[in-house]
Amino acid sequence: AVRYIDKKALILRIEKCKKNLRMEKFEIDFTDKEITPWGGISLMRQMLQKMDIERVLAKISLPEQGSNRGYSPIQLILNFWVGIWCGANRFEHLEVTRQDEVIKDIFSWERMPGSKSFQRYFQKFNQATNERVFDRLYGWFFDNLYFDNYTLDFDSTVMTRYGEQEGAKRGYNPQKKGRKQHHPLLAFISDIKMIANLWLRAGNTGAATNFFGFLEDTLSKLQDKRVGLIRCDSGFYGKDIFEYLEGNNPKKATYPYIIAAKFYLPLKRKLAGHHPWLVLDEGLEIGESTYQAEDWDKPRRIIMIRQEITKRPKAVGKQLRLFEEETIYKNYRYSCYVTNLDLPTKTVYDLYRGRCDSENRIKEIKYDFGGDSFNVRDFWATEAALNFVMMAYNLMSLFRQVILGGQSQPFLKTIRYRAFAIGAYFIKDGNSRILKLSLAMKRRAWFMGLWNKSSAFEWPFSP
């Protein structure tokens, strides 16, 4: 059957659509009124003020400027953080906020530095300065978080470099093979989604290089709070690390740990011959045993997982591939963890699974906070810049949990366009200044709720 079409009605409908789609001409003009696209950054200013951040930065002995005309070190650090929160992913991007007069007024700054000022200032940091400044800064931050018994995740990441920066060496770089890189070591606090420490390292170092010194430095920065669990990937698998965590360290302290195993041939054979397997879910089985490598002084507990590829196509882990003619092992992906925990097997497995969140933190540091791009020629200057990036991350994590609240933990990119990207300008009302925000009526009550939370924020804080 042929459907009847009213041609006249169709023509009228098409004309109406054209009229609706037609863009009307308009002209442009300019205003002298100073307007910012980042009015919501006033929430961060409110929280920082309640933390008395300027006094803290004044007490940690930041390097002084050599000239009276130089910018205050306190302003440079605060300005650096604000630029990152507003979207700067490299030093050149900091020029964007430099031209923002309203941000300058929000933070009561007389003038704003250019991108070169930040680079010159970070050049004043050396190894001794970094140790002094960041011991105090991290120490102050975690001392004021009334939280104890942390889960510490240790990981390393590759930061590709394209210039001739100190310490940029060729190493294992899966994304940019043959490129120079830095290979920093990081410590994450899984429980509160914060970063406890960062050491910059040359690009040709191994994952576990300097681990012992880094661990002790991290514990010092945490004000010697308790560590309930340490989790690491297979890059930290080794007898010396196991023994160190089991008490062979200067403090004679024992740390509970779960470390992913490297699949050397003897361990592969151990997995291949294991029986029985306990079924946890469809295509997911778990087992436990003890294992002693040739260079170990004693056997250690291992937790083994295998996932059937046909039933779980996205399964993580490795295939054993012991012999070409054996096909049974090719149907599974295996994972294995070494631990000194005396907990049920499934509990240990579930505990280690939480470590994957550190990968999300690394991605956010690189893509939202510019961790990959804030580098200068001097090695220690780059480490200083990166540690201030880490502190910008911690302050934003605190903002997420205290001011925004909620179950989800959105990335900075989401927060930036949800809470910070609000047009605003200042007006005077007698002796008072008022920040006028351009916000839709139905969002105003929500923003006032955030403003009241930031105004009522108390420091020290109990998560």
Image (cartoon, rainbow, N blue to C red):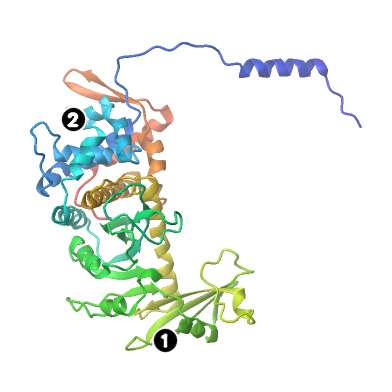
Q: What percent of the width, then of the height, locates residue 383?
A: 24, 52
Disc on res. 108: 2
Category of crowding for the residue at label 1, using alpha-carbon neighbours closer than 10 angstroms: few (below 14), some (14–19), many (at least 20): few
Real-space Cα separation, disc 2 to disc 1, in angstroms: 62 Å
Give x and y (percent) for residue 251. Answer: 17, 76
Residue 415 in view: yes
Which image quarter: residue 156? bottom left
Is 272 placed left or right of 73 in the picture?
A: right
Q: Does 24 appear above or below 292?
A: above
In the rendered view, does 393 fall on the left or right side of 213?
A: right
Image spot of residue 10 (x, y percent): 77, 19
Sequence-wise first label, 2 or 1? 2
Along the horizontal axis of the image, is 387 left or right of 444? left
Tell which of 67 and 452 is nearer to you: 67
* Image spot of residue 310 (x, y percent): 64, 69
Please name the residue shown 42% across and 27% down the image: 440
Q: Is residue 455 visible?
A: no
Mark number, residue 290: 1
Graded by Cα atoms within 10 Å as few (under 14), some (14 to 19) or many (20 or more), the crowding at tag 2 reads few
Q: Residue at x 52, y 71 (%)?
A: 318
Give, as a three-letter code, the residue at label 2: Ser
Q: What is the three-letter code of the residue carrying label 1?
A: Thr
Q: Nearer the viewer, residue 41 or 188?
A: 188
Q: Is residue 65 above or below residue 354?
A: above
